[in-house]
Amino acid sequence: MAKGYWIASVDVHDPEAYKAYVAANAVPFAKYGARFLVRGGSGETVEGAFRSRVVVIEYNGDLDPTVPKVMPYTPGWRWDRTSGYGASLAALEALGEAKGYRLVHTELTGVNAFFVRAELADPLPAGDEVPRRSASHSLLGHGHPPPRHEPEWRSGA
């Protein structure tokens, strides 16, 4: 499957302020085609420290990872199991930058990207040092067929 995910973890100390933060995120998340897959829930930290809230955001690894591209939100839209969905890695990278995160790595199959809070990312690769990979179907062993009807993509920048 040519999808990638952004996973973030946060601690919520002021629930009312966090509600306002979530509401403010709705605009850029819609602009960049972000879709929440996991939010909240309980967990267990086996070793080390972990924040209390984890967020996973999907992106489309089939799209050119260097071009900000977003499928506009369409109420009632259902995924048709093709590559015509979501947002590109470049669009997710722009969203991350707007939220204070920096892309530091993508793995070989092109479906997992790793973001770190910008203030913590200094020792990690930046800019052109970070590989931006499309989904590698030869490594994955499968892929999605092209869209039946090309979505009306918009720029995610």
Image: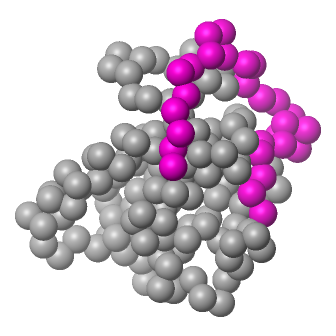
Rendering quarter of residue 149: top right
The answer to whether residue 105 is magenta is: no
Rendering quarter of residue 45: bottom left
User: Where the N terminus falls, by quadrant?
Assistant: top right
**Residue 27 x, y percent position in the rendering:** 30, 46
- Check the image and report above or below for 51 versus 40: below
- Taking the view exactly as shown, the residue that stands out farthest to the top is 148
**Which residue is at 73% across, 19% downward?**
146
Residue 43: tell me if it is visible: no
Q: Which residues are magenta?
A: 131-157
- Check the image and report above or below for 6 versus 68: below
Q: Nearer the viewer, residue 146 or 81?
A: 146
**Residue 125 x, y percent position in the rendering:** 71, 79
Drawn side of residue 24 relative to residue 128, left or right: left
Query: Tag count in the figure?
Result: 0
**Which residue is at 14% across, 59% downward?**
20
**Which residue is at 35% across, 16% downward?**
76
Residue 61: tell me if it is visible: yes
Main SS of the magenta part reads loop
- Taking the view exactly as shown, the residue that stands out farthest to the left is 16
- Check the image and report above or below for 89 versus 153: below
Q: Nearer the viewer, residue 148 or 49?
A: 148
